[in-house]
Image: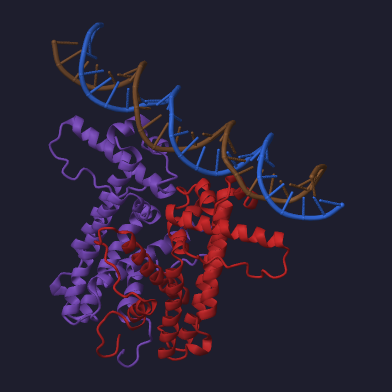
Chain colours: A purple, B red, C brown, D blue
Amino acid sequence: MEPLVLSPPPPAADLSRRERERLARRQAMLAAALAVFAEKGYETATVDEIAERAEFGKGTIYNYFPGGKDELYFALFEEVVGSLHGIIEREAPGPEAVQTRDDVRDGFRRLMAGLIEHFQANRGVLLLFMKDGHRMMLQPEKMAHFAGRFAEIIDAMAHPVEAAVEAGALRPLPPRAVAHMIMGNVRGYLMAEIDADCDPTGSTERPDFGTPEQAADFITTILFDGLLAPGDASP
Amino acid sequence: MEPLVLSPPPPAADLSRRERERLARRQAMLAAALAVFAEKGYETATVDEIAERAEFGKGTIYNYFPGGKDELYFALFEEVVGSLHGIIEREAPGPEAVQTRDDVRDGFRRLMAGLIEHFQANRGVLLLFMKDGHRMMLQPEKMAHFAGRFAEIIDAMAHPVEAAVEAGALRPLPPRAVAHMIMGNVRGYLMAEIDADCDPTGSTERPDFGTPEQAADFITTILFDGLLAPGDASP
DNA sequence: TCAGAAGGTGACCGCCGGGTCACCTTGTGA
DNA sequence: TCACAAGGTGACCCGGCGGTCACCTTCTGA
């Protein structure tokens, strides 16, 4: 079993043994739930299997997550969206680092490499999003919440884009649309990799750039430099 | 209810009335199934609802699709993958139309506009893919089939890319990887549009280029010309 | 008009999985 | 060692859904 993101109790200091154990069990359940959701998708995953994989009785799951399957899923979603947000805030280039074309190019290349590395190490997380991200549009009240969280992430990415546009280093395009594109391409690359892994026949093309750095280079070349062969200045 | 793709009986000529009616009913069932699958996703969709929306009894569905839910889904998938393939084969620029940088740029811009237009008019189709495309990785024998179909689509798109690379109009990058990126960006744009539509709060950014032409322009600019502000020749 | 075929129908079956709760295990303090 | 509390457990309940089939409607041809 992979380690998964699932921060080990982040402010875990000075708690009674009881409380620490309770927290640890909670984490174990979330880890099992992530694995099962990622593998089966929300609908097909069963609480029984989550309980079994976490090595608890089904009832115990409901002690920790009275909301059952739903609550497990949403708790995971929060952790995941939080870590994604964290990576972007931490690794995105600041306004001072996007003044020149070379800087902005390199800044985003590094950010993308970081995202790819993170999600390669935590596939379950990505699959969780990809397989069931759309399922929650069925509950309007939750949809609003998730839309908000996603918007935060896009915003975090759009800020350096906007700064770069203002500095004249990037084309004057809508920053959030550009942020969307960048995120979408990282996601697309990761999904292609996962598809290739799942495909026993090998007819799905495996991206032939193995390391996060190579993948980020590829995406950066296309998105920032453009597909067209270099010649005189672009239009 | 939208018209949906679902080709009206393509070689519908000279059939007995019985046969024509049977075909028409089959199409109606597929259309209903597409609507329900797109709305609910495969797992959540019920055969009862498909039957109800098609205005048939549940048993009748099983007369036409003995395999039940699965068979309906896969029949749809075939239709959809076929139409996608058709669009690409029809609208992709031929080898003679990708010799110069301007030609290849414009050729792909038009192809992308065509894809976007098609999927905007047939949202259900896109959602069908997006929501449940990954579900079938659970059945290895079917997974192989779908991987093959997807590979065909990527291939169809990779051919003009390869020709353009050979002509020196595009950077020398792996053609299939590039094809993947182009498809991925079209898909990403469409998904963003759908997300925005589904989001009642409006906190999801709506892409502010309404027509397929504008959207294709945006994607073309980024993918082909690059995000970096034009200056001296790109690296 | 009627007999028979073709085929649509929905009540019904059985399974499956989310959620509950009475029971029992484990750990604690006296 | 015992009594009690804390809390983990899984057998059980029940609603929902995929799939079936005996029935009935409808259409056809004589």
As drawn, D4 above or below A14: above
Can you see residue B43?
yes
In this view, the residue farthest toward the bottom is: A232
As drawn, A196 above or below D17: below
Residue at x 32% of width, y 68% of height:
A213
Can you see residue B67?
no
Q: Is residue B14 left or right of residue A157?
A: right
Residue in the foreground of this view, choosing between A220 and B26? B26
Which quadrant of the figure has residue B121? bottom left
Residue in the foreground of this view, choosing between B59 and B72? B59
Q: Is residue B100 left or right of residue A18?
A: right
The spot of residue B39 in percent (x, y) is: 43, 55
Tell me the quadrant of the picture where the C terminus of chain B can be found.
bottom left
Residue at x 15% of width, y 43% of height:
A11
Residue at x 54% of width, y 60% of height:
B77
The spot of residue A48 in percent (x, y) is: 41, 35
The spot of residue D21 in percent (x, y) is: 67, 37
Residue in the foreground of this view, choosing between A135 and B166? A135
